[in-house]
Image (cartoon, rainbow, N blue to C red):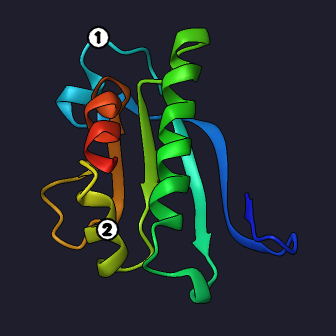
Amino acid sequence: MIADADDVVVAYASVAMTGIDRSAAPEVLAKGAPDPVPALLLGRLAVDHRYANVGVGTALAAHVLATAVELNHKAACRAVVVTALTEHARTWWERFGFRPLAPNEPDQLDLYLLTSGIDATLRRMR
C-alpha cells in the first residue's frame, strides 16, 4: 500500500501464493518444476486515477517483484502471475517482461514472469 502525506491510500497491491497446473504451463515454466508450479499471484494492483502516469504503479509492481525474489530464497516461488483486466493492462505488464500463460490464445490476459528473470526486469524499471 502507498499513502500520500495525509495517509490517504493512493495505490495498493494484493498478493497470495498460488500453484499453476504443470501440464497447462508453458515449457519454460513447467520444466523441472513440481506440480503444481509454485507462484506468487498478484491478485490486484490499483492506483488512484489522480496518481496515474507518475510511476506509482511501476514502483509498487517493482516492490511486488522484489518480494517474489525474496520469497523464492525462503520457499519455492518459480514465477509471478497476474491477470490483466484489459488489453491496455496486458501491454503494461508485457513491458516488464510478463508473457502469456497460453501464448496460442490471442486474447490471453493471464501472464507470468519467471522469478529468475526478475532481477533483469527490476534493472529495466529503474
| Residue at image location 53% in from the left, 66% down from the top | 56
Mark 2 neighbour class, 10 Å CA radius: few under 14, some 14 to 19, many 20 or more: some
* Nearer-N-terminus badge (2/1): 1
Q: Which residue is mark 2?
A: 92
Give the percent coordinates (x, y) of residue 38: 50, 26
Give the percent coordinates (x, y) of residue 4: 76, 71
- Name of the residue lying farthest toward the right: 7
Q: Is residue 123 above or below residue 54?
A: above
**Which quarter of the picture shows residue 85?**
bottom left
Q: How many marks?
A: 2
Q: Give left or right: position of 101 versus 72.
A: left
Q: Does residue 39 appear in this view? A: no
Q: Which residue is mark 1?
A: 32
* Image marks 2 and 1: residues in contact by CB distance under 8 Å: no
* Along the line of sight, the residue nearer the viewer: 124 or 103: 124
Amino acid on which the number 2 mark rests in the picture: Trp
| Residue at image location 47% in from the left, 46% down from the top | 62
Mark 1 neighbour class, 10 Å CA radius: few under 14, some 14 to 19, many 20 or more: few
How far is disc 2 from disc 1 in space, using C-alphas?
29 Å
